[in-house]
């Protein structure tokens, strides 16, 4: 039981780190509007508590993978995006 609580706490920390990184992209005026919208959609997905953290992370990764392929995404934002995806990929099912 303690192991499960510890893992859940780690997942929440990772989720919040990813959301903070994505918020930097979503709030930047140097990022094209369509990309900001997709990033905001992924943040909303991550904050939807109706699903488990692992499912939210998997859904967001799928959407963010599409964003990462966009040639209009500036390289500094791409680095931030992949850092957020790495945090999401580290989230484990409980």
Image (cartoon, rainbow, N blue to C red):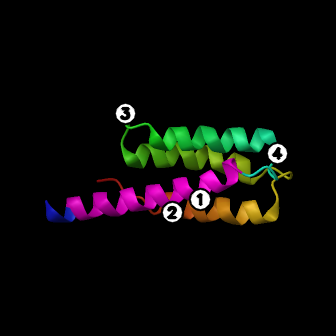
| Residue labelled with disc 2 | 87
Q: Secondary structure at mark 2?
A: helix
4 or 3: tag closer to the N-terminus: 4
- Could you tell me how far apart the alpha carbons at marks 1 and 3 are, in whole angstroms? 22 Å
Q: Locate residue 54, reporting x and y percent.
A: 40, 49
Q: Nearer the viewer, residue 58 or 47?
A: 47
Report if the CB atoms under discs 4 and 2 are less than 8 Å apart.
no
Drawn side of residue 65 relative to residue 90, left or right: right
Which residue is depicted at the point 46% across and 56% down? 16
Drawn side of residue 3 relative to residue 91, left or right: left
Residue range of the region highlighted in magenta in the rendering: 4-27
- Could you tell me how far apart the alpha carbons at marks 4 and 1 are, in whole angstroms? 17 Å
Report if the CB atoms under discs 1 and 2 are less than 8 Å apart.
yes
The 10 Å Cα crowd at callout 4, few under 14, some 14 to 19, many 20 or more, is some
| Residue labelled with disc 4 | 32
The 10 Å Cα crowd at callout 1, few under 14, some 14 to 19, many 20 or more, is many
Instruction: Give residue 50's mark.
Output: 3
| Residue labelled with disc 1 | 21
- Could you tell me how far apart the alpha carbons at marks 1 and 2 are, in whole angstroms? 10 Å
Q: Residue 47 lies in magenta, yes or no?
A: no
Instruction: Give residue 47's mark.
Output: none
């Amino acid at each position: 039981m303690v192991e499960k609580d510890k893992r859940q706490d780690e997942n929440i920390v990772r989720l919040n780190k990813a959301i903070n990184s994505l918020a930097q992209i979503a709030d930047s005026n140097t990022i094209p509007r369509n990309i900001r919208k997709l990033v905001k959609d992924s943040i909303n997905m991550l904050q939807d508590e109706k699903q488990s953290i692992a499912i939210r992370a998997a859904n967001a990764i799928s959407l963010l993978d599409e964003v990462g392929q966009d040639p209009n995404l500036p390289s500094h934002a791409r680095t931030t995006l992949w850092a957020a995806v790495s945090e999401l990929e580290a989230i484990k099912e409980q």
